[in-house]
Image: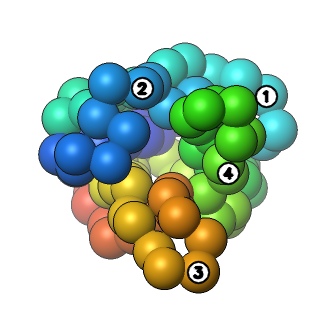
């Protein structure tokens, strides 16, 4: 098993709406603005994305893929951005892998 850490960066865009976390296309949890969550995840290939029902929009972040390794830790940061083209955009970035001893 490895540790998956997800941190939602502070943002005024949709600040009062929770994001839904989906791991391998299955709902995992909600995450609030400025919140950090940790999960124990099986050692295998995974996909992860976030979803926000802000004003019924059903916004979905980019989908990321990663391989969880034994005793490793993956840190993911997410945020909302306001864009001219599409309004609000959910984004996952800053993926970092650490070895846990």
Foreground: disc 3 or disc 4: 3
Q: How many marks?
A: 4
Between discs 3 and 4, the one toward the N terminus: 4
Between discs 2 and 4, the one toward the N terminus: 2
Q: Residues within 10 Å of mark 1 (few under 14, many from 20)?
A: few
What residue sits right under mark 3 in the picture?
Answer: 85
Q: Residues within 10 Å of mark 3 (few under 14, many from 20)?
A: few
Mark 2–mark 3 Cα distance, whole angstroms, equals 21 Å
| Label disc, if present, on residue 17 of the rendered structure | 2
Marks 2 and 4 close (CB-CB < 8 Å): no
Q: Secondary structure at mark 3?
A: loop
What residue sits right under mark 1 in the picture?
Answer: 26
x, y percent for residue 29: 55, 19
Determine if residue 66 is in view: no
Foreground: disc 1 or disc 3: 3
| Label disc, if present, on residue 60 of the rendered structure | 4
x, y percent for residue 54: 56, 34
* Quarter location, residue 4: top left
- Vertical placement of 100 versus 61: above or below? above
Residue sticking out furthest to the bottom: 85
């Amino acid at each position: 098993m490895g540790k998956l850490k997800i941190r939602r960066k502070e943002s005024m865009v949709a600040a009062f709406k929770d994001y839904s976390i989906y791991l391998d296309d299955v709902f995992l949890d909600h995450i609030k603005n400025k919140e950090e969550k940790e999960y124990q995840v099986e050692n295998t290939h995974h996909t992860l994305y976030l979803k926000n029902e802000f004003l019924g929009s059903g916004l979905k972040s980019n989908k990321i893929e990663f391989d969880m390794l034994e005793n490793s830790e993956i840190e993911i940061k997410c945020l909302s951005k306001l864009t001219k083209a599409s309004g609000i955009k959910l984004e996952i970035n800053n993926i970092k892998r650490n070895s846990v001893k």
